[in-house]
């Protein structure tokens, strides 16, 4: 982490990904496919891997889904987490099938079966996420708190943390998700004062891409800036691959992880004489999934353009039908507007080559 205090948590290990302690804040997602359809699930996970996802969760609603896990686990390269609701036997089956983590929801699993789940987790070296959700809290807590407020979320989490601790199990991470950003923020703040387990951040049911980006940036971003959070998931309705750039964008904006391209572009005004929106979309598409950090400036006029482009690794400051290609403050050459994308990509390739040779 750069430039921020980070709350100290005890680390857990899921496969080759460490969460908590001094480990980088990791990026997670969850498949939207039917887990029983191994082909579609694998195809989606591979797209997630390519986009930069570091851990992936799959739904395990029945025994057929649990039976599909070994085929999935054998053909992916990132840790696999099983999402379990209601049925403790499915959690045990998933662990026996090789998942590195399970997520259980305290509000919908009978506590009397938790010892069996913990026994299997200990035997298989599995991390358990206590996944508290405002939409499925225990009824007594909803009555006590007059609804799913931050206090109810925290009380639910603490009761289940104690349950696992009483069984001498500490390979735990915790999430406290709500669709209400203010409730989510306050819940994590309260819990972080009481336990040192790693926290998985997310705003649940965040909606479409734009809504999810807004709510996740506020909720996850606020907590990360306060030093709270060890792993994150941006929840987007639809294709989960769209979650990954948003997650890394939040981390980059806070200078927590400088991963992937940072594309800055002006909002455009009456002085802009190039099709900046088209250029920005084209560059984003061509650089999607890139892991190494680069700052790329796409500027539409000569007012702030040269200055912003000069601060970037590479950039274009546009004019009427043409622009100047910059590299670290140095003008490289004049480029026609129709050649902007290819010129930028060629310069980026040279930068990458120079870094490898350095």
Image (tube, grey):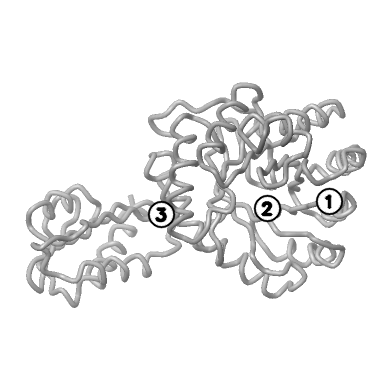
**Disc assigned to residue 148:** none
Q: CA distance from mark 3 to mark 2?
A: 21 Å
Residue 177 falls in image quadrant:
top right
On-image quarter of the N terminus: top left
Which label sits in the foreground, 1 or 3? 1
Residue nearer the viewer, 304 or 73: 304
Q: Which mark is residue 86?
A: 1
Residue 117 at what x, y percent from top left? 87, 43
Tell me what residue is drawn at x 63 percent, y 39 percent: 176
- SS for callout 2: loop
**What residue sits right under mark 3 in the picture?**
260
Tag 3's secondary structure? loop
Toward the bottom, the furthest residue is 338
Q: Position of residue 208 (x, y in %)?
A: 49, 61
Location of residue 289 in the rendering, given as x and y in whole percent from the top left corner: 45, 62
Q: Is residue 161 left or right of residue 262?
A: right
Which of disc 3 and disc 1 is earlier in sequence? 1
Residue at (84, 62) in percent of width and height: 62
Residue bearing the label numbered 2: 79
- In the image: residue 190, left or right of residue 107: left
């Amino acid at each position: 982490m750069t430039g921020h205090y980070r709350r100290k948590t005890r680390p857990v290990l899921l496969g080759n990904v460490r969460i908590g302690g001094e480990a980088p804040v990791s990026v997670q997602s969850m498949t939207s496919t039917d887990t029983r359809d191994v082909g579609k699930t694998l195809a989606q996970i591979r797209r997630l891997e390519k986009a930069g996802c570091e851990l992936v969760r799959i739904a395990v609603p029945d025994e057929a889904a649990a039976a599909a896990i070994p085929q999935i686990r054998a053909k992916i390269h990132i840790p696999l987490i099983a999402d379990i609701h209601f049925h403790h036997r499915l959690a045990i089956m998933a662990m026996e099938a090789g998942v590195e983590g399970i997520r259980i929801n305290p509000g919908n699993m009978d506590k009397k079966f938790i010892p069996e789940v913990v026994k299997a987790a200990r035997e298989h070296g599995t991390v358990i996420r206590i996944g508290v959700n405002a939409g499925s809290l225990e009824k007594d807590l909803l009555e006590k708190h007059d609804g799913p407020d931050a206090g109810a979320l925290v009380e639910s989490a603490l009761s289940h943390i104690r349950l696992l601790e009483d069984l001498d199990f500490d390979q735990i991470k915790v999430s406290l998700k709500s669709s209400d950003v203010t409730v989510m923020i306050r819940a994590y703040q309260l819990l972080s004062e009481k336990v040192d387990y790693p926290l998985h951040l997310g705003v649940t049911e965040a909606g479409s891409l734009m809504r999810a980006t807004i709510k996740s940036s506020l909720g996850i971003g606020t907590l990360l800036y306060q030093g709270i959070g060890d792993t994150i998931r941006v929840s987007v309705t639809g294709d989960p691959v769209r979650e990954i750039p948003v997650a890394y964008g939040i981390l980059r904006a806070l200078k927590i992880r400088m991963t992937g391209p940072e594309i800055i572009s002006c909002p455009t005004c009456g002085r802009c004489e190039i099709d900046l929106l088209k250029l920005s979309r084209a560059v984003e598409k061509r650089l999607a999934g890139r892991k190494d950090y680069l700052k790329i400036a796409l500027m539409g006029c000569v007012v702030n353009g040269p200055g912003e482009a000069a601060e970037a690794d590479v950039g274009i400051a546009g004019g009427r039908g043409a622009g100047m290609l910059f590299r670290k403050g140095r003008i490289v050459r004049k480029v026609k507007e129709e050649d902007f994308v290819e010129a930028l990509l060629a310069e980026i390739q040279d930068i990458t080559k120079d870094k490898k040779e350095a």
